[in-house]
Image (cartoon, helix red, strand yellow):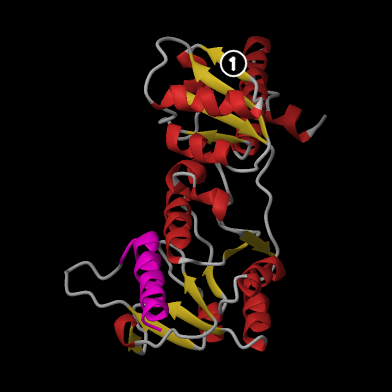
Amino acid sequence: MTKSENKYKHLTRKQKYFADSVNKGHDERNNNEENYIKQREDLVEGRNAVIELLKSNKTIEQLFIANGKMEGSINKILGLAKDKGVIVKEVDRKKLDLMSETKAHQGVIAQITPFKYSTVDEILNYAKQKDEDPFIVILDELEDPHNLGSIVRTAELCGVHGIIIPKRRNVGVTATVYKASVGAIEYVKIAKVTNVNSTIDELKAKNIWVYGADINGEEYSYDTNFNGACAIVIGNEGKGISKLTKNKCDKLVKIPMIGKINSLNASVAGGIMMYEVLKGRIKK
């Protein structure tokens, strides 16, 4: 008798059947949830995000449009899709609701090939091609896809050459990230690395100064000289930057706050830090 069978030996035949059904359903549900998470990395939702996607060189497998009256930016999407020869399928809005991760698809979802991550070297070469000092954002175990999307959007506006994220315990590029970035994800290089701390060591060896955003920083962000090659580290939404990563930073920088709440949303903190770097580069 197996351990599982032994657990149910006191049950009636009918009760055993019900217990087996529940367990089977639980296993199927877990498998479906895993598949669902994987599929979401292949989808882009929302009108603005899909428009930017169609303008890019990304491979689009097919486009799902809610059937009904076609108006506004949907017509623009259809026009761009036609120009690029993208397959368009009109489907019931309920199908889009089931596919959607963001629950705000605005009547359009694009299925794409999975997001192509860059390497750290590609990010550095991109800065070299532009004849600019490298400007990098490092995310330390960020969990919220909305935060990642917002950071990507700000990074694109601030001239960041690339974002570095760890392969484990960090949100990747999902449909929610696409949506929150409003299409900026198509213009920002993102590298996934096995070990953030080792990567920081490699960047420092290349004379890139590493700054960590931390409430106990030794200097305020507006007093910090970010000129030259630099990387900004933004920590986890709840825990902030891990202790080991904090020790790897050349300098910890704090953002001025006078309210009763002593912490900022990760994407807001990242935005403030990125704009301080941009401000110094514009003045230069």
Can you name the residue that lies furthest to the left here?
A: 259
Residue at the image point whose x is 61% and y is 59% from the top = 190
Residue at the image point whose x is 71% and y is 70% from the top = 121
Q: Residue 180: x and y, percent?
A: 43, 45
Q: Is residue 265 in the magenta section?
A: yes
Image: magenta residue range: 264-284
Q: Is residue 144 left or right of residue 244?
A: left
**Amino acid type assigned to the residue bearing label 1 in the image:** Lys
Could one spot residue 14 in this view of the protein?
A: yes
Q: Residue 33: x and y, percent?
A: 60, 33
Could one spot residue 30 in this view of the protein?
A: no
The residue that disc 1 covers is: 89
Q: Is residue 159 left or right of residue 117?
A: left
Label 1 element class = strand
Q: What quarter of the picture does the N terminus occupy?
A: top right
Position of 190 relative to 9 (above/below): below
Residue at the image point whose x is 64% and y is 81% from the top = 203
Frontmost residue, 263 versus 254 = 254
Can you name the residue that lies furthest to the right here?
A: 1
The dominant secondary structure in magenta is helix
Q: Is residue 44 left or right of residue 274?
A: right
Q: Is residue 56 in the magenta section?
A: no
Can you name the residue that lies furthest to the front here?
A: 83
